[in-house]
Image (cartoon, rainbow, N blue to C red):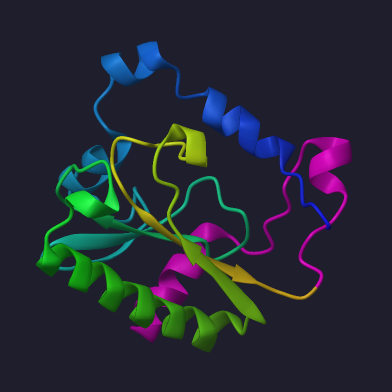
Amino acid sequence: MRRLFSPWRSQYIASFSEKDKADKECVLCKAYRANDDDEHFIVMRGKLCYVVMNLFPYNSGHLMIVPFRHAPSLIDLTEAESAEVMSFLKSMTLALKKIMHPDGFNIGSNIGRTAGAGIDEHVHFHIVPRWNGDTNFMPVLAETKMISEDMRETLLKLRKAL
C-alpha cells in the first residue's frame, strides 16, 4: 500500500486549538455573514449553502460547499440542505472540469476531529481537483505546498464558468 503524507496539514489542524475555538466565531459562519464575497473567496451562494475556496488548499481549485446553518455533521442536515449540497457538488465539479481540466477529483467530508476535520463544528464538503503527478517533494523537504494558480484568478474563472 502506498501512503501520501501531508505534514503541512498538521500545522493547519493545530492552529485550531480548543481555546481558540471557544474564543472565536466559526470561520465558516463568519465568512458568509460578512457579505464580502471577494474578500472571503466565496464563489457563489444558494438558498441554504454557499461555495467557498479553501484558504489552505491541497491543490489549485480546492473548493468547499458549506451549509449556512451551523451544524456539526452530515446527519444533522435537512433534506433540503442535503439536496443543495449535492447540487453544488455536481455543478462545481463540472465548472472545475471546464476551467481547469483535472484528471480526477477527491470529493468528501471529514466529520469530526478524529476524521481529520480542521473545522469540526460546522460540516462542509470538499472538492479537490487532481492531476496525474500532482504530488511532489516540496511539502516534505521544504514545508511548502505548491499551488499553481493565484486564488483570485481561479475565483474569477469559476464565477465566469457559472
The boundaries of the magenta stretch are 133-162
Name the spot of residue 154 as percent of width and height, x first: 50, 68
- Residue 155 magenta-highlighted: yes
Task: Work out whether 27 lies above or below 110.
Answer: above
Which residue is outermost to the front?
1
User: Is 13 in front, or is 157?
Assistant: 13
Name the spot of residue 78 as percent of width and height, x first: 12, 59
User: Is 10 in front, or is 141?
Assistant: 10
Residue shown at the point (67%, 57%) measured from the top left: 147
The quarter in which the C terminus is drawn is bottom left
Name the spot of residue 5 as percent of width and height, x first: 76, 45
Task: Work out whether 10 lies above or below 51.
Answer: above
**Within the image, what quadrant is residue 142 found in?**
top right
Task: Work out whether 64 lies above or below 119.
Answer: below
The quarter in which the N terminus is drawn is bottom right
Task: Work out whether 23 lies above or below 60.
Answer: above
User: Is 146 in front, or is 16?
Assistant: 16
* Direction from residue 127 to residue 149 in the image, left or right: right
Residue shown at the point (11%, 68%) measured from the top left: 80
Name the spot of residue 127 as percent of width and height, x first: 48, 66
Residue shown at the point (26%, 67%) measured from the top left: 85
The number of callouts visible is 0
- Residue 134 magenta-highlighted: yes
Which residue is outermost to the bottom?
98
Residue shown at the point (82%, 70%) measured from the top left: 133
